[in-house]
Amino acid sequence: MNPPEPPAPTTSTLLQFTDFDLVIRISDNVDFTVHKNIMSFASGTFKDMISLDHSSSTSSPERRVEVAEDSAAIGAILRYIYPLPRPVVADIWTAVKLLNLADKYNIPNISNALEEVLLKGSYHEEDLVLAYVVSKKYQMDRLKDMILPLLVQSQEDFDDLTFYYDDLHVLSLDDILSVKFYRELRAEKAFHILKDFSLYGTVPPCKCRARRVSITTTFDCFAWRRFVLICEHRLKRDPMLNILDPSLREEAAASNPCPHARDNLFGSYGDLITYGKRRIGELPWIFPTEFEAEKARLRAKYENWTDNVVFRYNT
């Protein structure tokens, strides 16, 4: 008994051209009728497939190429090539699916269009690490430049990276170390903004300092110094910390022996803290020059260690 004949392919109604000269047959036995010159111009992969295809007879004006994707995937990429409504990018995973197709079929138009969509939307908020990985893999420099400061601002510590997507390998050690370096350096700069304020003549001297220091020393309350240290510590963990949060002053006052600590922090030091918040807000979020300098310093230190090794032997 002969096996049953396979079902005849159906033709997609997405594109209904009478002058088509290329058939794309997909895995679910659906044909898309398109144009060789348009597909060759839009897709480097289809250009190669068309030039290598010899499945059609010379008497037929149409050629046929076969692909592994289903009709939903091919239909989606054709909507970026022909003037048709494009897929709705509802989440970042939709963008990843389309970018994978664009990469496989070498269709730059899709990557360019999706970068614009991702820049304008909030899709990256679902997973900043994934969004950064996507921006690196597909060389979306503008998207990467937007996401990197957001990674620094976040509390992402990279301690819980998951491998549920295959592209995580594009995240380098430099990427991880730079985010941590930027976060810590910014907290250090914020600390120095507060620490280096000249309080003399700005706030009334506090007796807790005046009794212990010379006339040449500033008379800032011990609670102020405690407040500055608390801010530095918290900013390293939460870069978006609002130093106007009253709980920070409450904590500094509670852990300080000065009886005037709370009055000082909520009174005469209040305007100073507000000014400090504005100064901290003006700090950049990334410091690439400083990061490269730190790498060079550590590299030189390591090389110095190895250069000065003295070999010893047991006699």
Image (cartoon, helix red, strand yellow):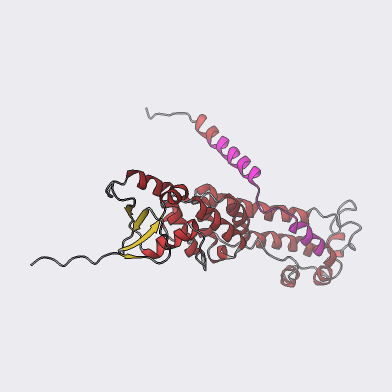
179 lies left or right of 6: right
* Residue 306, percent from left and from top: 50, 33
Residue 123 magenta-drawn?
no
Q: Is residue 292 magenta?
A: yes
Q: Quadrant of residue 115?
A: bottom right
The secondary structure that most of the magenta stretch takes on is helix
Q: Is residue 59 visible?
A: yes
| Residue shown at the point (63%, 52%) measured from the top left | 182
Tell me if 284 is positioned left or right of 82 in this view: right
295 vs 31, nearest the viewer:
31
Left or right of 252 on screen, residue 264: right
Q: How many marks?
A: 0
The image position of residue 266, as x and y in percent, is 82, 71
Which residue is pictured at 70% across the width and 63% down the height? 230
- Evaluate whether residue 164 shows in this view: no
Q: Residue furthest top?
A: 315
**Depth order, front residue of 13/231:** 13
Q: Position of residue 168 (x, y in %)?
A: 45, 55
Compared with residue 78, is residue 265 higher up or lower down, i.e. above or below?
below
Left or right of 114, for residue 17: left
Task: Quadrant for the C terminus, please.
Answer: top left
Range shown magenta? 274-302
Which quadrant would the N terminus be assigned to in this image? bottom left
